[in-house]
Image (tube, rainbow, N blue to C red):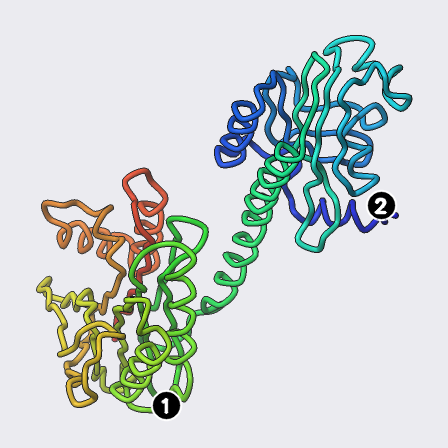
Amino acid sequence: MVDERRRQDALDALGVLDTPPDERVDRIARLAQEAFGVPMVSVSLIDRDRQWSKSQIGLGTNEFPREHSFCNQSVKADAPLIVEDATRSQLFAANPYVVDDPNVRFYAGHPLRAPGGEPIGTLCIVDVRPRQFDEAQKSLLEDLALWVQTEIAKDDELDQAALIQRTLRPRQHPEVPGFSIAAGAVAHRQLTGDFYDLSLQGNSLRITLADAMGKGTGPALVAATARGSLRTEPDRPLSEAVAEADRLLIDDLADMTMFVTAVLARIDIDSGTLDIVDAGHSLAFILRADGDWVHLRSTGLPLGMGMTDDERRPMTTTLGPGDAFLCCSDGLLDVLDPVDPFSQVAEVLARRGPQGAVDEALRLARTDSAIDDVTVIVVRRET
């Protein structure tokens, strides 16, 4: 027997009730209509006292009382329900949806289950004519229901993964006398292949920004792997940290043809000395107080491409009073002025300061022109 409280809790936890239409689910409903040649299809979720449709064709409304719902019977039994002629069914002959509009005669529904196995709804097909339903059709309906179930669960899993990613970002940026520090990130989709880190190690500010190739779940997992490696033993030399992350990616992900571009930097708080290792990222700069731009490049291909340790050589420069260190993912390039991005950045930074510049970058990352994840770090030495 189905535990109603547990079932309802599982449905609520998915957060799918009363959400907008989803093209992925709508597409499955259309396929079901075409495959079975029926006028009505519904992806139905059984709430406390109602049946609500995430997707529906031909029913005219997304919501019905639960007490008269055919889908409710399938959910209560946690089993497929096939009614070939409702007028001959003792359970449904007097049902108002059989006696009156929409004059249901045929119904076939297969349960949809939450990730924990609880029945939360059905994929159902409905006809105004009695019809027979053979084993091959039952198997097809089951396959389509499993597809719907996967899509619904996928949204919840992605939401949870995105939440975890957000919690892994620095909750607070270090406060360093004489420096202004700002950073932020916006994922183009639910999951991001970017990550950044800012931390104080003794008298040094350590900065990390990395970008896994591609978009979606795969790059997000690769980014998590790289992040875990780069965060361990944070006081070790930059070149050693990069080399170890490189070896890890090669050992674990060699068959995936995945790589990660990365920048690791360390700023000495007292002297302003900046050491940087660039692993194929090439998007780290200094904007000098006099307006000159310095593009910081050190030797290195992306992580995962098999460079030897002695090729990961850091470069050293100095951050003077009024100088700003800037680093970003390549998604920022898509939203900046393509003709003169440097002037745009310099103007915003001068007018709004590091935090305002990051805020503006993240605002642009949420516009229609953005096609990738955007991550930005700005550290300015004030004195």
Residue at (65, 17) in percent of width and height? 59
Q: Is residue 245 left or right of residue 136?
A: left
Label 1 secondary element = loop
Based on the displayed image, in which of its 4 quarters is residue 181 positioned? bottom left
Q: Are marks 2 and 1 in contact (CB under 8 Å)?
A: no
Give the percent coordinates (x, y) of residue 78.
79, 43
Q: Amino acid at mark 1?
A: Asp
Q: On the picture, is 155 further left or further right than 190?
A: right
| Quarter holding residue 234 | bottom left
Please provide percent x and percent y for residue 214.
31, 57
The residue pinned by badge 1 equals 235
Badge 2 marks a residue whose secondary structure is helix
Residue 14 percent coordinates (x, y) = 65, 47
Label 2 and label 1: CA atoms lie apart by 53 Å
Q: Which residue is found at the position 37% from the left and 66% from the top? A: 195
When the figure is inspected, residue 348 is found, relative to residue 19, above or below; the finding is below
Residue at which label 2 appears? 4
Q: Residues within 10 Å of mark 2 (few under 14, many from 20)?
A: some
